[in-house]
Amino acid sequence: MTTTAQALVLFAHGARDARWREPFDRLQQKLASALPRCDVRLAFLELMSPDLPATLADLATRGVAEVTVVPVFFGQGGHLRRDLPALLDQCRQTHRGLRIHCATAVGEADAVLDAIAAYCIASLQGAAAGPA
């Protein structure tokens, strides 16, 4: 059994190229360092492992009581409107003792859009200062 009562699952799409997941791994590591009393995991919709049902099953087996799933997607497309709710309903039925919450897609948050906008502005300024 785990000693954490709470978990955070970063839910991403997945890709065929293994390098695609590198920023998600870095994000998971940053969050795990910032939240030492929280079990921080990655889960994928398709093409990569682990998937969300396997991740939630493992957390339930370890005795985690509450999970927040954060879709690391830019917007609320079909996967988040249809596929994710169906997966969460399936997992809630399978693991009745596990409280599962879901946040909106990270790209829907103004703070995230502000950070991306700041990065774009800095990139433009950096390109202007660089060699022609």
Image: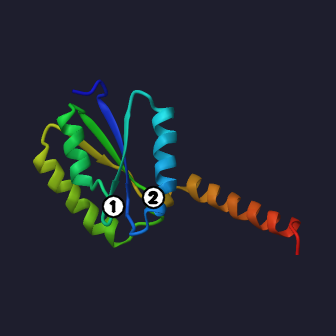
Q: Which residue position holds label 1?
A: 48
Q: Quadrant of the rendered structure where residue 86 is?
A: bottom left
> Vertical placement of 27 versus 21: above or below?
above
Q: Residue at left 69%, top 59%?
A: 119
| Element on which disc 2 rests | helix
Q: Residue at left 44%, top 28%?
A: 36
In the drawing, what numbered circle is on residue 21?
2
Left or right: 47 as drawn, with respect to 130: left
Q: Quadrant of the rendered structure where residue 32 is?
A: top left
Q: Position of residue 25 (x, y in %)?
A: 46, 49
Amino acid type of the residue tagged 1 in the rendering: Met
| Element on which disc 1 rests | loop
Q: Position of residue 35 (x, y in %)?
A: 46, 32
Which circle's residue, 1 or 2, is located before the other in the chain? 2
In the drawing, what numbered circle is on residue 116?
none
**How many other residues sit within 10 Å of disc 1, few (<14), some (14-19) or many (≥20)?**
some
Q: Residue at left 32%, top 33%?
A: 6
The quarter of the image holding the C terminus is bottom right
Residue that extends furthest to the front in the rendered view of this protein: 18
Q: Position of residue 7 (x, y in %)?
A: 33, 37
- From mark 1 to mark 2, how far is it between C-alphas? 9 Å
Q: Residue at left 38%, top 71%?
A: 77
Amino acid type of the residue tagged 2 in the rendering: Arg
Check whether the beta carbons of the residues at disc 1 and disc 2 lie within 8 A of each other: yes
